[in-house]
Amino acid sequence: MTRRHLERATERGVVGMRSEPLDLGPEARIGGVRDGRLYWTRGRTVGVWTRSEGGVSLGTLPTPGDGRLDAAFRLRHGRFAKVALRPVVGSWTTTNLWPLRDGTLLATVGRRVFRSGDSGRSWAPVHRLPDSSGPMGTLPTSVCLHGGDVYLAEYTLGDDPARILRSDDDGRTWEIRVETTEVRHFHGVFHDPYRDALWATAGDTDDESAVGRLVDGEFVRVGSGSQRWRAVGLAFTPTAVLWGMDCSYAADVELLRLRRDGPAEPETVGRTDASAYYAATLTVDGDLWVAVATAAEIGDDSTAPAGRRNRSGDAARVLVASSSSSYETWYELAAFRRRRPVGERVPGVPTASAYVFLAADERLGLFVNPFNARSDGGSVMRVPPEAVSRVADEAPAVDASAPDR
């Protein structure tokens, strides 16, 4: 992606699109869409948005309630600390939310997993994640429904084994389905709607990076051995599985297509300037669109080879392509410059990266949620389906050659 492309982005970020901003308040985070309802969080507040009623708060995620830990939990995940530290470190999120079915929601706040059976009005703790889990507990790609069961991929950063859990009672209780020390952690677990298969992504070194399926309680690699197989989110189409490389130090971050009935190696269909994280799909007028979100990351990758430094760009982006081009022509739908807090100028002070969270619904369109961006950080915008289909006329195409740095 060239600097010229970034400069063409509007201050709102969505280039030429007739997007609708949703009034969900500052620092809102989208969870998922189900039955025409977009679920979101703002801190520990849980809410829902519909076209008829707008944004409505449903309830509040609880604290664990065990003495000193309860106080530390409130401080770490409460809104006061985040507001107070935002000018120094930027905005960060520690909450995830997933709508399951029939009013059942699952959420993580830090290392705690909570379940609601009444559409978010009340919550109960159902699992504690390993102590080595990241600040967000898991990634937004870590939960899916498959074959009537719920799967949760833990996201450990230490020496704990990588695990994927399964629940056969809508998240009330959990059992270990996959446990391995051959990868550092799992980035996500995914239901393949076209083959009724269960996929997972793992990282982070070359040997640990893998895209594969879960078969009889084992993680079976489809491919691995390089950063090309280091993925977070997957996008499924009838003929292929697509992802972007999750590698901040790569000289060339590729968007990749693995044909279902083709070569064992993925094909490069696009390139960008920063790690790709999240993906969403949307059918419009018979064309299947794939959206991929990149991140503007801060700091170096602890698993990178010696001398390989972070090369992430200055903006988090949303790139889209459709089945009409076999996903070989990509367009920049949005670009959001990363917020630069004052702590960035002070050695040793950690600062936050910028991300774009995605959700899609065939009737409502694509939801774009930049976080820790210079403008629109924590806002949510809805791009209607008809606007997505016009992107080729209104947004710049991404050059498939190596991006300018």
Image (cartoon, rainbow, N blue to C red):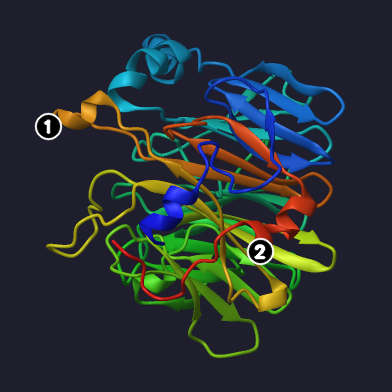
Which residue is painted at 36% across and 36% down in the image? 131
Indicate the quadrant where residue 1 lies. Answer: bottom left
Q: Position of residue 199 (x, y in %)?
A: 60, 65
Question: From this viewpoint, is residue 192 visible?
Answer: no
The answer to whether residue 207 is left or right of residue 381 is: left
Indicate the secondary structure of the residue bearing disc 1: loop
Mark nearer the viewer, 2 or 1: 2
The answer to whether residue 325 is left or right of residue 119 is: left
Which residue is painted at 37% across and 56% down in the image? 3
Neighbours of disc 2 within 10 Å: few (<14), some (14-19), many (20+)? some
Q: Position of residue 139 (x, y in %)?
A: 49, 45
Camera-nearest residue between 242 and 261: 242
Is the residue 138 above or below the residue 176 in the image?
Answer: above
Camera-nearest residue between 268 and 151: 268
Residue assigned mark 2: 392
Indicate the secondary structure of the residue bearing disc 2: helix
The quarter of the image holding the C terminus is bottom left
Give the CA distance from mark 2 to mark 1: 43 Å
Q: Position of residue 282 (x, y in %)?
A: 74, 58
Is the residue 306 above or below the residue 7 in the image?
Answer: below
Indicate the quadrant where residue 340 lies. Answer: top left
Neighbours of disc 1 within 10 Å: few (<14), some (14-19), many (20+)? few
The answer to whether residue 137 is left or right of residue 61 is: left
The answer to whether residue 96 is left or right of residue 161 is: right
Three-letter code, disc 2 = Ala
Residue assigned mark 1: 347
Which residue is painted at 37% across and 63% down in the image? 183
Question: From this viewpoint, is residue 29 visible?
Answer: yes
N-term mark: 2 or 1: 1
Camera-nearest residue between 395 and 183: 395
Which residue is painted at 55% across and 36% down in the image? 12
